[in-house]
Amino acid sequence: MTELISKYLPLKRSKKRNRRKRALTFSVLGVILLLILVGSGFLIDTQGLVVNFDEANSAPSWSHPFGTDWLGRDMFVRTVKGLSLSFWVGLLAAFISGVIALILSLLLLVNKTLDSLVTGLIDLFLGVPHIVALILISFMLGGGLYGVIIAVALTHWPRLARLLRAEIMQIKNSEYISVSRHMGKSWFWIAQHHILPHLMPQLFIGFILMFPHAILHEASITFLGFGLSSEQPAIGIILSEAMGYLSSGMWWLAVFPGLMLLVMVAVFDSLGRNLRKVFDPFKGQKH
Amino acid sequence: MLKVNNISFGYNSEHGVFKDISLSLKPGEILGLYGKSGIGKTTFAKIIAGYLKPDTGSVVVDGETYPFKRRNPVQLIGQHPENTINPRWQMNQVLGESGVFSDEFLRELGISNEWMHRFPSQLSGGELQRFCLARALVPETKYLIADEMTTMLDAITKAQIWETVLQLIKQRQLGMLVISHEFPLLKRTCHRILDFEDLLGKN
Ligand SMILES: Nc1ncnc2c1ncn2[C@@H]1O[C@H](COP(=O)(O)OP(=O)(O)OP(=O)(O)O)[C@@H](O)[C@H]1O
Ligand SMILES: [Mg+2]
């Protein structure tokens, strides 16, 4: 029996460690991929964006791997530019959303009235279809870059806020928090020292996982015409313009940008999932 | 003076744990409370230390009632130290939360220096209990409620810790309530011993 246990335990632990290592490797790979994408958005030669009717409407080739559009602009350059814009919009929107989620969920510590207000707001936002709220807010703000960022930021916090709120509630009710209160510590001190460090992994993963949503939603409202304006090199703009040319057989206008958008979203999603696996052993510090 | 006036408490409205209990504890006094398992001693201790609110009656600490805005002069040492410590903190952070302690004081409580960088999950219940005791014994503390404080310790460690605690109680003139089902321990340490059944019966 003891032999069995001693054989089984180290095996289980090493398996767990291996899984964590793999998750870490994938996370690093994801970060590198994203860095390459964002970096190339900065560094890429914008010569390809110049209108060049001689090369208009050409199918993918070695000199234009994603083909060119009706103005002769290189679709690869446009796609990379579009993705990098999506990245920054997503980053800003997800960051603002994360901050909103954190602050609102921490109101639980202040008083009951504020907390029930927050809960009501969460339910309200989760009750309205996402895309409707997005279009409404973006439209109200007059669209454009800031309209989109704020619309995406204001619609993505509720899920994370609900998660964080549940976590805070659990910590708040634990005995060591009562002990801390009886040591005369304020709720502010407790939030800072006991609760925030505990929430950080959750918050970070929530933020990463919000990214793909933010990017897809930005692209979709832009596609629908409520988001970024047509001068911006956005993926949503590229896709909606491409719609008009699909019937003339220019499939590459939509296929490559669409695929690249999906790849970026998938990379973020897998990064979030793998990071969760990396952080998981810290949950509770129980070995 | 720590005064408990006619308190009643129940975890739910149908079943009361106890009714109409009164008690007083003077500075410098060590009072023992004896009673069988499940009778309500821990519940009583939590009320005295302000962790639970009594349904009726009051707890008056040197003329003041709960809740205090400052550090509670009544400190509770519980039965389950592992729940009273943040599981993600190293032990030096745990001590740091309540104050600065001299090496000598920590040594007297049997706290080893190499435990300071460990997490609570890497220490035994008895080892954790010493940390709980240390952080409860800050200068602001006037009353100490010890609920089965040393039940999980071996005889030698137990004797060593009690010696330190009793000396401190005497030196600082703290009031102490010792809750235990070990009658010999109470007999050795306390000035006066109460049976919880008697307290219950008196109403
Ligand atoms: N959180 C709770 N909710 C409901 N009932 C509880 C709760 N905690 C304790 N009780 C009940 O209240 C009664 C008193 O419990 P308490 O822990 O005060 O007993 P005790 O005298 O300290 O026992 P022991 O000597 O075993 O520690 C018990 O019947 C117990 O089941
Ligand atoms: Mg008990």
Image: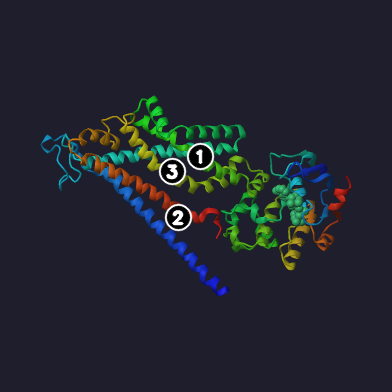
Q: Is residue A207 above or below residue B77?
A: above
Which chain is home to disc 1?
A
Are the two marked residues, 2 and 1, in contact with CB atoms closer than 8 angstroms? Answer: no
| Label located before the other in sequence (2 or 1) | 1
> Which secondary structure lies at badge 3?
helix
Are the two marked residues, 2 and 3, in contact with CB atoms closer than 8 angstroms? Answer: no
Instruction: Check disc 3 and report the residue beneath it.
Output: A207
Residue occupying image coordinates x 33% and y 48%? A34
Q: Position of residue A62 (x, y in %)?
A: 15, 48
Q: Is residue B46 above or below residue A88?
A: below
- Quarter of image, res A52: top left
Q: Is residue A61 left or right of residue B70?
A: left
What separation in Å lies between label 3 and label 1 (alpha carbons)?
Answer: 11 Å
The answer as to whether callout 3 falls within 8 Å of ligand 1 is no
- Quarter of image, res A3: bottom right
Q: Is residue B127 left or right of residue B8?
A: left
What separation in Å lies between label 2 and label 3 (alpha carbons)?
Answer: 15 Å
Q: Would residue A88 be visible to someone looking at this image?
A: yes
Q: Is residue B6 left or right of residue A7?
A: right
Instruction: Check disc 1 and report the residue beneath it.
Output: A161
Disc number for residue A278: 2
What separation in Å lies between label 2 and label 1 (alpha carbons)?
Answer: 22 Å
Q: Position of residue B175 (x, y in %)?
A: 80, 50
- Badge 3: residue crowd in 10 Å (few <14, some 14–19, many ≥20): many
Q: Is residue B31 above or below residue A156?
A: below
User: At label 1, which amino acid type do we have?
Assistant: Ala
